Image (cartoon, helix red, strand yellow):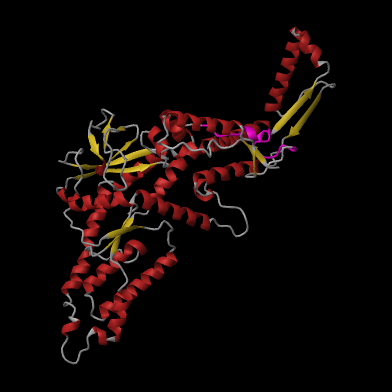
């Protein structure tokens, strides 16, 4: 049946902007007359059956449903109780943050391997990955957090210039959640770019605990929000996002209520009943009769516990009843699946539970989840990590070459077989180019040692062995300056094939959080 609705408050009679006086009043009267005489019009934009009361708007229970406003992101105490008191809330907050920072990055470009080792050590010594991890966690829990780059000798209220960082002045990250800093709303970023409209400065509001009062320029911050919000909702949250727990609140309550209810049923798994003649009269009479009944039951309970004997009167009747828990596991699983979908974390990661079904391993779910984590890394970590690497390199006295870059290492771990195959291919390629005279033995050993970060093989190659190989060999011949009778690489099939094999490889190192 088509749905009836009143006409839209848009008239076909328009009032020109130039209308004045009587003309304007005449047009207004025409509009009012048109609206008053308008009739209901039929629409067919949804299914409704008024006779059966089926469909939204047909006076049924579903028509009374709506969505409420429960902004728990503003309740810091509740969020902290949920994080501390519920393991599910803890995993929802922690798992994506841990996975975003677990595998680290791999840098690319014409960077000296020794410089890459120094950068790798700098990440570990300054606890860069733990700082990013905490920033992501508190951003997800509270709706927003910043990691401030601590640079000794610089005013934090001034814009960051990575090329002006003094050697050894970068001291790591200071993590501040949204309740520890106050954005300055009077000064927003007005420069065109991805930071347009965001706070230009943050002021710390926590005194003591070694955290000074300071004004921080946004260019010095690694900012991670929880759930991005539309403009007006972002205004209500002090220009931050929303806690990831806010959307899950109803599913969390449903899951915990179901789990706790099932746990309470365990106490009723073994029910016992005792039928006593004239029990109602004994209870009504009270006094010695009721005291005697109570004592008799207490004596029966005591002997059941100690001797396993049930003492009852010949006219009494004692029975046991077993409670069936059939279907409870399916209910719990259904709520768990809803929670997993709401958190966007697969069951195998959130609950450590493998999916049911024939030949189901959960690999596809994990791979899809890892793809989502990689998307989060690109959205939230790519830009700030680029700035952070420039600051770290300058502080360590390293000049990064033009065209340098990095990529996030995949979370999917290779098997021992995969690592062995990659090590075999790398060693074969290195051996061929070294045998063709394209690289020196020293460079070949460096390449093998560098590949150990991925494969775990050749990790025992020492710097002394590399230097010894350099001293025991001559520099590789210049292919363009070979003597008569010796073909250049273009005419040397072995050399040309070796160059072709390694030409697409990028030299880099795994700047890993777990190294």
Residue in the foreground of this view, choosing between 222 and 492:
222
Tell me which corner region of the image, top left, top right, bottom left or bottom right, holds residue 180. top left
Q: Which residues are the magenta region?
A: 51-68
Foreground residue, 379 or 93? 379
Q: Residue at x 74, y 38 (%)?
A: 52
x 65%, y 45%: residue:
44
Question: Does residue 217 appear to the left or right of 61 in the view shown?
Answer: left
Residue 514 in percent (x, y) is at 35, 52
Left or right: where does residue 167 sit relative to residue 426? left
Q: Nearer the viewer, residue 193 or 96?
A: 193
Q: Is 59 inside the magenta-drawn segment? A: yes
Does the image show residue 309? no
The spot of residue 216 in percent (x, y) is 24, 37
The majority secondary structure of the magenta stretch comes to loop
Vertical placement of residue 339 versus 498, above or below: above
Of residue 152 and residue 299, the one placed in the foreground of this image is: 152
Residue 273 visible? The answer is yes
Location of residue 397 in the rendering, given as x and y in whole percent from the top left corner: 16, 54
Is 395 magenta? The answer is: no
Residue visible at 24% across and 55% down in the picture: 119
- Direction from residue 114 to residue 17 in the image, left or right: right
- How many labels were placed on the picture? 0
Q: Quadrant of residue 312?
A: top right
Report the residue that reaches farthest toward the right. Answer: 315
Which image quarter holds the C terminus? bottom left
- Position of residue 315 relative to residue 125, above or below, is above
The quarter of the image holding the N terminus is: top right
């Amino acid at each position: 049946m088509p749905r009836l609705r009143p006409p839209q408050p848009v008239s076909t009679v328009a009032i020109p902007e130039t209308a004045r006086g009587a003309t304007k009043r005449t047009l207004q009267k025409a509009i009012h007359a048109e609206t008053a005489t308008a009739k209901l019009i039929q629409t067919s934009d949804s299914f409704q059956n008024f006779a059966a009361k089926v469909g939204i708007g047909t006076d049924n229970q579903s028509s009374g449903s709506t969505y409420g406003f429960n902004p728990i992101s503003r309740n810091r105490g509740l969020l902290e109780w949920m994080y501390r008191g519920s393991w599910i809330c803890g995993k929802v907050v922690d798992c994506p943050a841990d996975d975003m920072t677990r595998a680290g990055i791999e840098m690319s470009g014409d960077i000296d391997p020794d410089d890459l080792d120094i950068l790798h050590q700098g990440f570990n010594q300054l606890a860069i990955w733990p700082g990013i991890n905490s920033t992501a966690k508190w951003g997800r829990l509270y709706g927003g957090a910043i990691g401030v780059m601590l640079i000794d000798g610089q005013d934090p209220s001034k814009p960051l210039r990575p090329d002006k960082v003094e050697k050894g002045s970068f001291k790591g990250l200071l993590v501040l959640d949204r309740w520890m800093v106050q954005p300055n709303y009077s000064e927003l970023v007005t420069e065109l770019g991805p930071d347009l409209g965001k706070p230009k400065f943050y002021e710390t509001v926590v005194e003591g605990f070694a955290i000074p009062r300071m004004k921080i320029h946004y260019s010095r911050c690694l900012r991670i929000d929880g759930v991005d919000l539309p403009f007006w909702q972002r205004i209500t949250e002090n220009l931050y996002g929303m806690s990831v727990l806010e959307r899950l609140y109803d599913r969390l309550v449903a899951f915990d209520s179901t789990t706790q209810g099932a746990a309470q049923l365990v106490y009723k798994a073994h029910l016992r009943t005792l039928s006593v003649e004239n029990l109602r009269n004994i209870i009504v009479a009270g006094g010695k009769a009721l005291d005697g009944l109570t004592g008799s039951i207490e004596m029966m309970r005591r002997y059941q516990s100690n001797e396993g004997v049930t003492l009852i009167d010949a006219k009494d009747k004692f029975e046991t009843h077993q409670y069936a828990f059939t279907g409870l596991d399916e209910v719990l699983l259904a709520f768990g699946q809803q929670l997993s979908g709401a958190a966007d974390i697969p069951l195998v990661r959130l609950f450590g539970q493998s999916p049911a079904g024939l030949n189901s391993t959960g690999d596809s779910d994990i791979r899809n989840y890892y793809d989502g984590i990689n998307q989060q890394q690109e959205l939230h970590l790519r830009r700030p990590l680029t700035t952070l690497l420039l600051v770290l390199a300058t502080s360590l006295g390293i000049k990064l070459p033009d065209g340098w870059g990095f990529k996030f290492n995949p979370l999917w771990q290779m098997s021992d077989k995969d690592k062995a195959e990659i090590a075999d291919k790398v060693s074969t390629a290195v051996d061929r180019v070294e045998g063709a005279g394209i690289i020196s033995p020293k460079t070949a050993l460096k390449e093998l040692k560098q590949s150990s970060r991925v494969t775990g093989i050749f990790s025992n190659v020492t710097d002394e062995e590399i230097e010894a190989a350099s001293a025991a060999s001559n520099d590789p011949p210049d292919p363009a300056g070979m003597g008569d009778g010796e073909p250049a690489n273009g005419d040397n099939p072995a050399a040309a094939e070796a160059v072709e094999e390694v030409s697409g490889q990028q030299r880099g190192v795994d700047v890993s959080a777990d190294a």
